[in-house]
Amino acid sequence: MALADRQLWGKARRLLEDAAADASLQTAARRKVRLTLARIASDEGDGARAARAYESAAILA
């Protein structure tokens, strides 16, 4: 999250994608990670990737 806060998107994305897929993390943490990935994608102008990240965050139970 610190890398994302500093807008180091490339480094942050790789770590965040790993965290988003980690089933051992609490649901709220995985949702926050996916929302951060959506924000990164939006900032980069990648609407399709942002939409997928928002959708995956929304469906977490």
Image (tube, grey):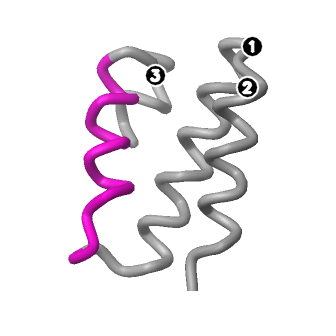
Does residue 3 sit above or below 30 in this rendering?
Answer: above
Estimate the spatial distance between the alpha carbons at disc 1 and disc 2, rounded to whole Å.
Answer: 5 Å
Q: Residues within 10 Å of mark 2 (few under 14, many from 20)?
A: some
The percent coordinates of residue 41 (x first, y second) are: 63, 26
Q: Which residue is pictured at 61% across the width and 51% down the height? A: 35
Magenta span of residues: 11-24
> Of marks 3 and 2, which one's residue comes earlier in the chain?
3
Q: Position of residue 58 (x, y in %)?
A: 70, 68
Kindly indicate whether the residue at mark 2 contacts the one at mark 1 (C-beta within 8 angstroms): yes
Query: Residue 50 placed where, x, y %?
Result: 69, 35
- Assign the magenta stretch its main secondary structure: helix
Amino acid carrying label 1: it is: Gly
Magenta-drawn stretch contains 44: no
Quickly name the residue at label 3: 6
Q: Quadrant of residue 51?
A: top right
Q: Are marks 3 and 2 in contact (CB under 8 Å)?
A: no
The amino acid sitting under disc 3 is: Arg
Side of 14 where 33 appears, left or right: right
Tell me what residue is drawn at x 64 percent, y 31 percent.
Answer: 49
**Crowd band around label 1 with a 10 angstrom C-alpha radius: few (<14), some (14–19), many (20+):** few
What mark, if any, has residue 45 been given in the picture?
1
Q: Residue under circle 2?
A: 42
The disc labelled 2 sits on which kind of residue?
Ser
